[in-house]
Image: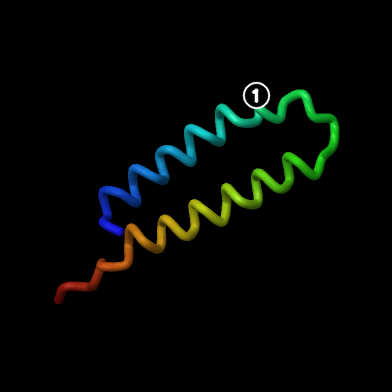
Amino acid sequence: MSRRTALAAIGVVILGCYGVPYLLIGQIAAWYGSFLFWSLAGVAVIVLNVAATRGWEDEE
């Protein structure tokens, strides 16, 4: 995955973090739907950050 694609995917996940709680799961009273969403969003951002920074190296 290229750096540009990974950063664009992170942007999509962040926009989803604003939209999904209010639009899709805002009417659900159970806590586990929200917990599952935030857990998966967190893991997705971590994986995408690793993909975006994979090629970075120290230059001396």
The answer to whether 9 is drawn above or below residue 27 in the figure is below
Pointer 1: what residue?
Answer: 22
Badge 1 element? helix
Quarter assignment of residue 49: bottom left
Q: Residue at x 61, y 51 (%)?
A: 40
Asked if residue 4 lies left or right of residue 19, the reply is left
Kind of residue at disc 1: Tyr
| Quadrant, the C terminus | bottom left
Q: Position of residue 37 (x, y in %)?
A: 66, 44
Quarter assignment of residue 23: top right
Q: Residue furthest left?
A: 60
Q: Residue at x 42, y 45 (%)?
A: 10
Q: Position of residue 48 (x, y in %)?
A: 42, 56
The answer to whether 30 is drawn above or below residue 35 in the figure is above
| Quadrant, the N terminus | bottom left
Q: Position of residue 53 (x, y in %)?
A: 32, 62
The answer to whether 32 is drawn above or below residue 17 in the figure is below
Q: Residue furthest right?
A: 30
Crowding around mark 1 (Cα neighbors within 10 Å: few <14, some 14 to 19, many 20+) is few
Asked if residue 47 lies left or right of residue 3, the reply is right
